[in-house]
Image: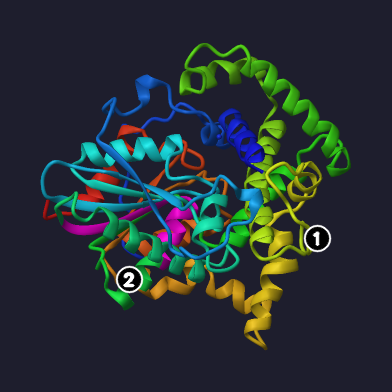
Amino acid sequence: MKRLLALALLLLSFIAVAPAAAAPPQSYFYPFVNPYEATVMELPKEFEVRLPDKVPIYEFVVRPFPKREIPEVFWYENGLICSLVYQDHKAPLVFLVAGSGSRFDVPRMLKLQKVLYQAGFHVISVTSPTHMDFVVNAASGLPGIATDDAKDLYRVMDLAYQKVRDRVDVSYFLLAGYSLGGFDAAFVAKLDDQQHRFNFRRVLLINPPICLYDSVSALDRLLVDNVPGGMDNFDNWFRGVFSQTMHLAEAWEPGGLSGESMYRTYKRMQPSESNLAALIGLTARMNAADMIFTADVMNGGGYIVPRNVRLTSTTSLTRYAIVAYKTSFVDYFEQWLFPHYQKMEPGLTREDLLRRETLRALEGYLKGSKKFGLIHNEDDIILVSGDIEYLERVFGDRAWIFPSGGHMGNMFHPDVVSAITGFLKGKEE
């Protein structure tokens, strides 16, 4: 399944009346108008914030369940890796949560570490609870339910800080995350207000979904609605995409997977808007495939993998991969996740579960606490109709809503970086 994740990351590289919200600067300019292009195209260097080449970083391992037996197929897993970027003086510490299906060290996280280090923060970076490394080493159950994912994240954060507390001098704690990580951060903050291990002074949500189910459904429709010939032609279309991207990847210059090389390669591909949308949907589907397969194996099988089947380090996973990437997160929710929670809570309805696992369930909390900030884009492809207006009502002048940028495409635009660091520093800074 790691091959699936690698391919997903490769494909994403090709495609990758309340108080008024805080307005972006009048000079804000973003070079991609199409929201799909905006989502997948890194900013040309002349538009991107300048960051240090290197930052002091320390990687370490936490083991929330040290006695857990790891299935043989995951032979390479040995604890959850986190990282610390540190100052040589007393400073605030930001816990940074990765987006859906992402590790602590994906390029976007590494850049965000540099943004925050340059602004004067220590940073502990944490893998998404939907990534297979987290599912194997740190998940207490099935991933995808915000309240439970938050408990698992909070446990990891606590262990991570205990592991590095002698290395850093911390003045206070902050929390931030992007995409699903921003969504998760809201639920982690709520838990911290009950347990008070960190007492986060500020919490920043960057391009979060309001309802994970709605956002994943929207991404999946990009695939289902745009595969030429429909999903019956999925296998042929996928083989063609794979062949084309592999051919172009061979032509990359040394250093390979950079923003500039992706820009040149994308221009050579010149996919139609519908093909680009399908590629984005495919990437989301394949991220879900890794999570679902891993969760199935860790829970004894029965969904993707038959029960009592032993998977070893040499077992071919091809047939399971084929089933997994044809399984959407919505399928997973409807067929496994909801029935699982319904067994634990007799009488629980599907609507009840969906209602409590959205930012709307935290509306009063988010609206009433000045420690929450939001950064988003009007053309974000994971949002549905009415979401931006809702977020503006909830966050008011603690929301920075940019007119363009797709889903996180503009994250390293100087104006967006200024909003990120400005909010986390706070007025008293």
Residue 360 visible to the viewer? yes
Query: What is the crowding at mark 2: few (fewer than 14 residues within 10 Å), some, or many (at least 20)?
Result: some
The N terminus: image quadrant: top right
Which amino acid, mark 1?
A: Pro
As rendered, which of 350 and 245 lies closer to the eye? 245
Residue shown at 56% from the left, 67% from the top: 145
Residue to which mark 1 is pinned: 306
Rendered view: 63 above or below 81 = below
SS class, disc 2: helix
Whole-percent x, y for residue 130 in the image:
55, 55
- Residue at horizontal 54%, vertical 21%? 262
Q: Is residue 153 magenta?
A: no
* Residue 181 lies in the magenta stretch: yes
Reply above or below: 267 against 69.
above
Report whether 153 appears left or right of 398: right
Tell me the quarter of the picture where residue 249 sits. Answer: top right
Q: Residues within 10 Å of mark 1 (few under 14, many from 20)?
A: few
What is the three-letter code of the residue carrying label 2? Asp
Location of mark 2 (residue): 192
The stretch of residues the image draws in magenta is: 171-187
Q: Position of residue 195 (x, y in %)?
A: 31, 76
Using the image as rendered, state which of residue 136 and residue 188 is in the foreground. 136
